[in-house]
Image (tube, rainbow, N blue to C red):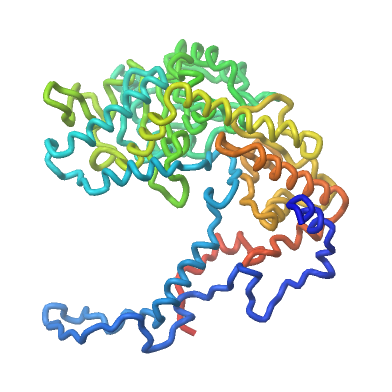
Amino acid sequence: MSHSQALSFLRNYDNSSNYQTETFTSNKGLHLEEALIFEQDTPGLTGVDWPDVNIDNTYLGNMRRQSINLPGLSEPQVIRHYTRLSQKNYSIDAGLYPLGSCTMKHNPRLNEKVARMFSDIHPLQPTATIQGAFAVIDELAYWLKTLTGMPAIAMTPAAGAHGELCGIMTIKAAHEAKGEGHRTIVLVPESAHGTNPATAALCGYSVQSVPANDRGRVDVLALKAALNSNVAAIMLTNPNTCGLFENDIIDIAKSVHEAGAFFYCDGANFNAIVGKVRPGDLGIDCMHINLHKTFSTPHGGGGPGAGPVVLSEALAPFMPLPYVVAIKSGYEIKESTTGLNLGRLKGFHGQMGMFTRALSYMMSHGKDGLKQVAEDAVLNANYIQAFLKNNMTSAFESPCMHEALFDDGFLKGTGVTTLDFAKALIDEGYHPMTMYFPLVVSGALLIEPTECESKETLDQFIGTLKYLAGQAKQGNADLFHDAPRHTPRRRLDETKAARQPVLRWKRG
């Protein structure tokens, strides 16, 4: 049976009457049921024989542990447990990961090989012994300044939000140095990432929202009306969170600068314009770059990440310390320069593993390859948008950048919600797209295919979304309300799980 015939068979199969959801083992095919490791405990069983140890505990007082309560399992049981747990995780190595705004793309194994070359160095080594590492940091800094058209860069921020913190602290320091500490307002567009207003508030600023127009971009007239002598900066994402390019950006930058404020750009979506547009040419003063997104280093699971911040000439004197500089005999670390610097924002010199991966990615692609990264990311997103426009409702009637945004208009009257739709996608073997974000769009479904996916992969994904949209419109709401059905766990009460998490196992 061909792949297309198999899909046709599955779609015409009467799941409601013929699909057996329960089995004797609780396994679903090769999706094996797995109990908690403590629940598999057999007292006295162990895969390792430990020698008896006599411990003089006089120095421990009453703090000696009586038992560590580890479960008793054989070695094969332990191996199978953790292997099965790993198989419950969806990953970019398993399939398309269409999360919008997150840029979940392939991480070339070459990057991993290069990162391992630096795995045995330590940040407390004498600088004479880690000149190669400093050379990597300096080379990466040069590439990032070249790609952004900016004269200075802070390499130490740990990730995107930390980069935002660095940028806004730099802006605050610049205003205070000019005697303009009265500037206490930061303007943030409605479609901004949630960390933008949070960062501004953390730095002591009042956040003022700027509305979007009916094209999904910043309302420039509303922005200009909000500018005054109390505004410190605007924090704008370009391309924005709706997947659209802010084509009034030069006018916005001019107006912000005329008001004496700075232009902070959230660089989370740099993937869509890298090699095509230099942010410095658009009038941007400050921008963080998510290396773990744009340059394909590992993303997700809480890190690690890296968020270098490029700075304009006006902000460069306030950049954080330390930073690497080239000297005649090699490289050294600058711990102080102008006296205006912020000081340390992070221990040591940044995320070395991310630096090596990102530089490997840049050097293997070259100038033309990085340009193609942006072009293919935009092409793939528009391909998805074009082929789904008659089945799902596009949030905005215009070509998109690196991600396609749909609203829940196509689900109206079906009894199916955005959440239901996403859960059904899991049964089809896909991680859902980003849901209900950005908040400015009703029931948003934000899809970012990245530049890595083949036409064949995109075609199958598009076909799946068309099929699900068709099922919803035909009134097959049970297909969605019961989803996911083919996973080791069915639909959970996610609200209760978030508010009342069970974080500790207790013996029955």
Camera-nearest residue between 72 and 363: 363
- Residue 22 vs 431, above or below: the answer is below
- Residue found at the very far front of the displayed protein: 1
Percent of width and height locating residue 393: 77, 36
Residue 252 visible, this orientation: yes
The quadrant of the image that shows the N terminus is bottom right
- Residue 243 vs 177, above or below: the answer is below
Quadrant of the rendered image containing residue 146: top left
Q: Residue at x 77, y 34 (%)?
A: 389
Camera-nearest residue between 295 and 8: 8
Q: Residue at x 50, y 66 (%)?
A: 85
Percent of width and height locating residue 176: 31, 23
Percent of width and height locating residue 354: 36, 40
Percent of width and height locating residue 67: 30, 83
Residue 201 visible, this orientation: no
Image position of 366 (left or right of 314): right
Camera-nearest residue between 418 and 303: 303
Image position of 128 (left or right of 109): left
Q: Residue at x 81, y 58 (%)?
A: 9
